[in-house]
Image: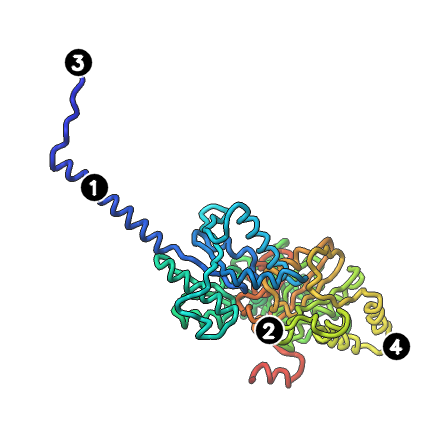
């Protein structure tokens, strides 16, 4: 042995036992943690409705794995042609999957792009032991159920969750002991706390109200300890008087709001006054108006747009086409104008109401007729909005609660220079099967856009159509 070199000394028996026990405990702890991670990791099975709602949905499940049944790919093939947003969503998803699987087979788990993402695969086997087609009937939804049930049997170590916008399919899944959920991305938490855009302030000192009447404005810190949302509207009340105002964030002050007449239409309550003020304010480029039937949403939007006709080259009116009996408008006879007319009648009704404020010999009556003939005022289908750049126009989108968040984003992204967009609708009156008050595009817009200087929102509460219409809203 070389000089000054000591032979290794074995640790005492007790110490060696402690080291060995420590290694075992560490290995056991690591094994337990790994098992817990495996158990906590989920596999989400997506239905066709989720893909048509959001083509990027498979990227939104964090570290969890995502699968789609082969039946979903078959259904997407039927949606890939057309100009609607759902057709775009189908095409984009198909392109994404094609790119993802360029060098792999879809039956294998493929890593999703991005940090801390899970894996993806297509489920080929839809022959589950617990056969949903035998229980519910032979249709695509039940083949999708079978795929999820078979995956649950194949991978008992993971929790399998069916994700679908179809409420009935979720119920059927739960009836078969399969966990099912709605697709939550883009869904607001509590519709009861949705931003209203306007408030009533009671017991405001009379001196503040007098200042607003005399000067037209006052510093916000005289009224509220903290500044409110930009373009937020208020009814300020004292013991005897009241005044309407809104918050101008740029000037850090409340400014008085006066009733204005717009192409023969006069607001009948405070909320209508606020809505018309926002529409006529050139500083505000994006507006949403929410309210039940008969509150005057579409009429105010149209009257305000006509009042500003000299500032814009065109006024576009549009509303989502929600086909009856799930049939596309292509089934209807005639050209595109004839097909759309039944869906656009409510817009024509509002135009006629405004036109009838004037005599047939008046220049206002004739001007409105000329605008329609010269296509200065146009009713257009939303299906053809993609790819366009809309400059120098006012774009009114009625029944916006029937749009998805992605559709709302698509419309707003079309805005060019000097364009104002107005969305109107009732978030509780939805005609499309895969949307609700929390997931529709109008609710999403209100929740996301509040406090932006270009945006204003108003909730209309009082029906002004007729006493009979109010009866229906209140009692039926």
Q: Quadrant of the C terminus?
A: bottom right
Q: Which residue is mark 3?
A: 3
* N-terminal label among 4 and 2: 4
Q: Can you say whether 102 is above or below 427 in the image?
A: above
* N-terminal label among 4 and 3: 3
Look at the numbered discs 4 and 2 and tell me whether their residues touch, using CB distance below 8 Å.
Answer: no
Q: Nearer the viewer, residue 18 or 476?
A: 18
The label number, if any, that marks residue 127 in the structure image: none
Q: Secondary structure at mark 1?
A: helix
Q: Residue at x 35, y 52 (%)?
A: 37
The span from disc 4 to disc 1 (Cα, nearest Å) is 98 Å
Q: How many callouts does the rendering have?
A: 4
Q: How is the image coloured?
A: rainbow
Mark 4 or mark 3: which is in front?
3
Q: Which residue is mark 4?
A: 361
- Res 43 → quadrant: bottom left
Q: Which residue is mark 1?
A: 22
Look at the numbered discs 2 and 1 and tell me whether their residues touch, using CB distance below 8 Å.
Answer: no
The span from disc 2 to disc 1 (Cα, nearest Å) is 63 Å
Q: Which residue is mark 2?
A: 431
């Amino acid at each position: 042995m070389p000089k000054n070199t000591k032979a290794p000394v074995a640790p005492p028996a007790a110490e060696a036992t402690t080291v060995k026990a420590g290694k075992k405990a560490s290995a056991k702890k690591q094994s337990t943690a790994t098992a817990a991670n495996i158990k906590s990791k989920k596999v989400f099975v997506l239905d066709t409705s989720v893909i048509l709602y959001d083509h990027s949905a498979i990227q939104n499940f964090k570290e969890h794995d995502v699968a789609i049944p082969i039946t979903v790919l078959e259904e997407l093939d039927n949606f890939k042609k057309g100009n609607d947003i759902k057709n775009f969503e189908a095409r984009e998803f198909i392109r994404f999957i094609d790119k993802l699987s360029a060098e792999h087979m879809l039956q294998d788990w493929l890593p999703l792009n991005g940090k801390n993402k899970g894996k993806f695969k297509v489920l080929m086997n839809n022959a589950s032991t617990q056969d949903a087609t035998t229980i519910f009937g032979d249709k695509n939804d039940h083949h999708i159920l079978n795929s999820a049930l078979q995956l649950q049997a194949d991978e008992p170590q993971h929790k399998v969750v069916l994700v679908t916008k179809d409420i009935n399919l979720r119920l059927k899944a739960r009836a078969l002991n399969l966990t099912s959920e709605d697709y939550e991305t883009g869904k607001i938490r509590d519709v009861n706390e949705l931003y209203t855009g306007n408030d009533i302030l009671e017991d405001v000192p009379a001196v503040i109200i007098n200042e607003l009447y005399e000067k037209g404005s006052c510093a916000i810190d005289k009224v509220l300890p903290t500044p409110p949302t930009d373009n937020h509207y208020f009814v300020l009340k004292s013991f005897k008087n009241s005044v309407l105002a809104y918050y101008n964030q740029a000037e850090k002050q409340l400014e008085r709001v006066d009733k204005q007449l717009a192409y023969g239409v006069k607001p009948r309550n405070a909320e209508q006054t606020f809505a018309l003020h926002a529409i006529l304010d050139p500083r505000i480029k994006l507006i949403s108006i929410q309210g039940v039937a008969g509150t005057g949403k579409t009429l105010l939007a149209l009257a305000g747009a006509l009042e500003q006709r000299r500032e814009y080259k065109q006024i576009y009116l549009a509303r989502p086409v929600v086909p009856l009996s799930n049939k596309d408008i292509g089934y209807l006879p005639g050209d595109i104008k004839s097909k759309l007319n039944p869906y656009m009648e409510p817009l024509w009704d509002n135009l006629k109401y405004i036109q009838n404020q004037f005599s047939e010999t008046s220049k206002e009556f004739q001007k409105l007729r000329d605008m329609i003939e010269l296509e200065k005022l146009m009713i257009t289908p939303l299906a053809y909005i993609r790819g366009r750049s809309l400059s120098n126009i006012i774009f009114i989108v009625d029944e916006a609660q029937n749009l998805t968040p992605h559709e709302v984003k698509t419309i707003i992204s079309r805005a060019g220079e000097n364009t104002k967009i107005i969305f109107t609708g009732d978030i509780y009156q939805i005609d499309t099967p895969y949307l609700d008050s929390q997931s529709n595009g109008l609710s999403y817009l209100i929740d996301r856009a509040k406090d932006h200087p270009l945006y204003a929102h108003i909730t209309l509460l009082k029906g002004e159509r007729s006493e009979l219409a109010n009866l229906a809203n209140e009692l039926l």
